[in-house]
Every structure is written in structure tokens, then in C-alpha cells.
Amino acid sequence: MRHLRKLLVPASLVTVLLAGAACGSNSAAPSSSKTGSFNLVTPGTLTIANFGTEYPDVVVKGNTISGIDGDYLNAFANKYGLKIKLFTTSFPSTILAVQQHKADVAVNFYWSAARGAQVKYSVPYTADYSVVITNKDQVKYTGPASLNGKKIGVIVGTVYTPVVQASFPANEITVYPGIAEAGQALINGQIDAMIESSSTYSAPPLSGAKNVAKYPITAGQFGITADNVSFPDSNITQCTNDGLNNAFNAELKSLQASGEWDKILKKYGAKTPATVYKAPVGGCNG
């Protein structure tokens, strides 16, 4: 809120690895010769900063992570014999966790120039699209004009914060610290609508809520450009951690080349075949 290796792994082996990764750890011993360049917070452990479930990208249960990104990181951890430890915090604090070396990687980030100056982005693994999410009991959405005079919620620090601030009067906007708070406010009728991502709509508490609906945003609505209708999802690492970032990119390319990546996308109902995105350019990404 989120924006390559040639080694081919037999599909049967990858399936076993991914199944074993669900517990968030691996029985293989870490190889210091392979992970020494990763600058891990804790040797032998991949510490993942996250801000909770955002289906289908990230699904968090206790100290386990799955979803598209979760399966990707589990496969990576298994390849290098690393345990997984989750660092669950608020959305804005995930960036700080990486910058302050409290976490090795933070999940599910869209690119922006401001963020790109603070952290390094991996090659994107999938993309979300921009939507209007409404309380159906309070708004009959027919387009941007139908939100005039309505109460709009936004999550602090997201790429949608400036969009909302430019599109609505300040007295109609309420800023929330996270998806849980903003989503519950929408369900309860404290706000009428949100401009957010498709994955936020599929995240608790909005997922399954009977009185909410989503509507895709097209280019030009709310000042959103054609480039920003859809946001590729990346993982982020410290600016200087080329070793870890390059290894993430290599693992994604390996999964794509083996055909396992399309299976992961299909498993979570995402678009297949996989789109191969380019790494963001600028800031820490050069």
C-alpha cells in the first residue's frame, strides 16, 4: 500500500517445499556461504515485517504466512534453509522496521518515489487495482460525483492518502492507522466510502462483510492516472541490502521459469499466466 534465477526446480519438489513451508520453518540447515550477503537481523532466520492479512497477497495466521507473497517467501526460505519469523505491525511501521534493521523484508508494497528513496524494491510479483469501497446502506455509487458530501476514510501513509486529500475537502476525510480500523468504520457506517486497493477489500474485516461493495476506478477518476489504476506489488529491503534483494528476484524468476508461479497464482485466484514485471527504477533502486 504495496510495487532472477535460471535454476529450474522440479514441480514435485517445489510442491513438497511449499507444503513444508506452511509451518514457517525449514529443517534444512542454513548455509552461511549462501546467506552471508543477506545481512539478516538474526542469522538463520528471515524476519518478515507485515501489517496483517491482505488476501490474496498475504495471509497471516499466528507466525505463519501464506498467500501469493507468503508462498513466495516460504519457497525462498526453504531454498536457503531459513526459519521464518513474522514482525507484525502497522502499515507505516513496516518501512521503519526494515530501515531500522528490525526486519529483513516487508511485504506487499506499491512503488512511490518517496518510498523508493527510503528502501529497495524487489521485482514486483503481482498487482492490485484501485477501487472505491462503499457502505451500500449509505451510498449508491454511480461514479465519483456520488461521493460528493460523503465521509471518506483513508489509511495513513498509503499511496491513496494524497489522492483522497486532493479529491475531497479536509472536513470530509478521516485518517485511520490501519485496514482494521478503517474497514470497521466503513462497516459501522462511521464513514461512507474508501479509495483503496482490491486487496484491502479482500482483507479482514471487509472480506465477507455483507454491507460493503467495491467498484473499479478508471483512469482520470479522482486524479488517478493510467499508470496508477493498477499498482504492482513488491517486497522491500534496506537500501544497501543488494544481496537479499537480488536473491528474492532470482527466486521469483526461478518459480516463474519452472511453472510453479502460475500454480501459486491460480491457487489464490489471481490472474494467470504470470505477468513478468520490471523492477522499479529510481531512489535506492538506482
Image (cartoon, grey):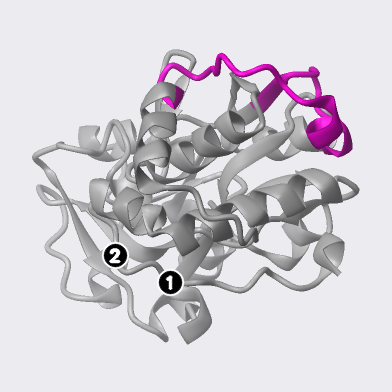
Mark 2 burial class by Cα count in 10 Å: few <14, some 14-19, many 20+: few
At 30% from the left edge and 52% from the top edge, which residue is drawn?
263
Residue 71 sits inside the magenta stretch: no
Q: Dot 2 corresponds to which residue?
A: 271
SS label for mark 2: loop
Q: Are marks 2 and 1 in contact (CB under 8 Å)?
A: yes
Residue 157 image offset from top left, x and y in percent: 62, 48
Q: Dot 1 corresponds to which residue?
A: 275
- Rendering quarter of residue 272: bottom left
Q: Find residue 171 and name its label.
A: none
Q: In the image shown, does 248 or 284 lie closer to the viewer? A: 248
Residue 53 image offset from top left, x and y in percent: 40, 33
Please tell me whether residue 238 is drawn above or below residue 266 in the rendered image.
above
Mark 1 burial class by Cα count in 10 Å: few <14, some 14-19, many 20+: few
Q: Quadrant of the C terminus?
A: bottom right
Q: Is residue 166 left or right of residue 220?
A: right
Q: Is residue 242 left or right of residue 193?
A: right
Please tell me whether residue 212 is drawn above or below residue 189 in the rendered image.
below
Q: CA distance from mark 2 to mark 1?
A: 8 Å
Residue 110 image offset from top left, x and y in percent: 57, 58
Q: How many marks?
A: 2
Please tell me whether residue 47 is drawn above or below residue 262 in the rendered image.
above
Q: In the image shown, does 172 or 61 lie closer to the viewer? A: 61
Magenta stretch in the rendered image: 21-47
Please tell me whether residue 62 is drawn above or below residue 18 in the rendered image.
above
